[in-house]
Image: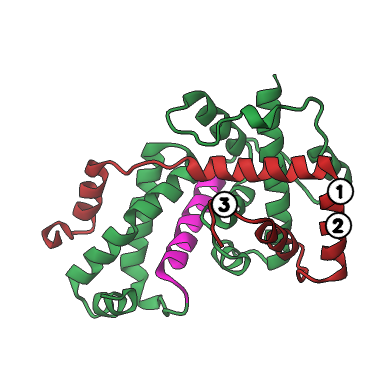
Amino acid sequence: MNIEKPKCKDVMQHICESLGEDLNSERCVAIKNHLDNCPDCKTYFDSVKITINLYKSYEVEMPTDTHKKLMNLLNLNDCE
Amino acid sequence: MEEKELVELAKAGDRKALATLVKNHEQTVYNFSFKICRDREKAENIMQETFLSMVKHLNQFDGNSRLSTWLYRIVSNHCLMQARKEKNKYFVSLNDNDDEDSELYVDKYVADWSRIPNSVAENNELKAILDNAIDKLAPDYRLVFLLRDVEGLSTEETAQATDLSIPAVKSRLHRARAFLRKEINQAFAK
């Protein structure tokens, strides 16, 4: 699965997996049918997807100094 | 060299192999620690504690999971221990309760999500909104959301890392997602 751009099937798989259901289970098929025809649910799931992607995009770079301090602390500075 | 081989060499006392393992995982551990505590100094401390634990207990790592999963578990333990020390901190209640559950899914005002930037890059206002929202989540909910949705671990790996059952991971994940979405919605609906 492309994590950056999940396809509808990936999203369904994710929802059904979270529910503990197989993709072809009766419940999952009913959810898919509902999602296809419910703009409110579609908006909701789209916004959940955006929420997750926002947190994914929030990365921080480790400062070089932090790396050096760690190697010193572990007595591994001579192994660089 | 493969990770398994590096782990075996490090276990046998090869310091260069150990240094390589640390270097291979330090950015991931630092980033994950930051995502949990949203503070660079605390993230550095958690990262140091995590690698000290890794060096001390590497012989206990059985190699049945990825080393990163094992490290996520150590970070999670440190995070939960840290949270227990901050007893006075208030977290929102997200218990398994139908009334509270339905409130999570109802929006008083609806934001225009198409106008929300799709990345936090250089956007300090958006970063503050995300920090503020996740800071309200109890640590076990925060961990489950970050491990499963942000770091991409499987439900089983998330359960292992947090010592929660699989149903508990699933229910926490639903509520954490719904809560964060609601907070962002409210911030942008203002």
On residue A33, the disc is: 2
Chain A on-screen colour: red
Helix, strand or loop for disc 1: helix
> In the rendered image, which quarter contains the C terminus of chain B?
top right
Q: Are marks 3 and 2 on the same chain?
A: yes
In this rendering, the answer to whether B162 lies above or below B177 is below
Quick one: label 3 or label 2, which is nearer the N terminus? 3
Considering depth in this image, is B61 or B157 the residue closer to the camera?
B157
Q: Chain of mark 3?
A: A
* Magenta segment: B65-84
Query: For the point 51% across and 31% down, which residue is it?
Result: B127
Q: Is residue B85 visible?
A: no
Kindly identify which chain the residue marked by label 1 belongs to: A
- Measure the C-alpha gap from mark 1 to mark 3: 22 Å
Q: Which residue is mark 1?
A: A37
Please give left or right for residue B5 compared with residue B184 in the image: left
The amino acid on which the numbered mark 1 sits, given as a three-letter code, is: Asn
Q: Secondary structure at mark 3?
A: loop
Question: Do callouts 1 and 2 mark residues in contact (Cβ within 8 Å)?
Answer: yes
Instruction: Where is residue B89? Give x, y as percent.
Output: 60, 36
**Which label number is shown at residue B177?**
none
Residue that badge 3 annotates: A5
Image coordinates for residue B27, horizontal then vertical, percent: 34, 52
The chain assigned the colour green in the figure is B
- A74 sits left or right of B101 in the view: left
Q: Earlier in the sequence, mark 1 or mark 3?
A: 3
Position of the N terminus of chain B, as image quadrant, is: bottom left
Rendering colour mode: by chain
Residue B149: x and y in percent read 59, 53
The question of residue B77 being in magenta is answered with: yes
Q: Quadrant of residue B25?
A: bottom left
Query: Secondary structure beneath disc 2?
Result: helix
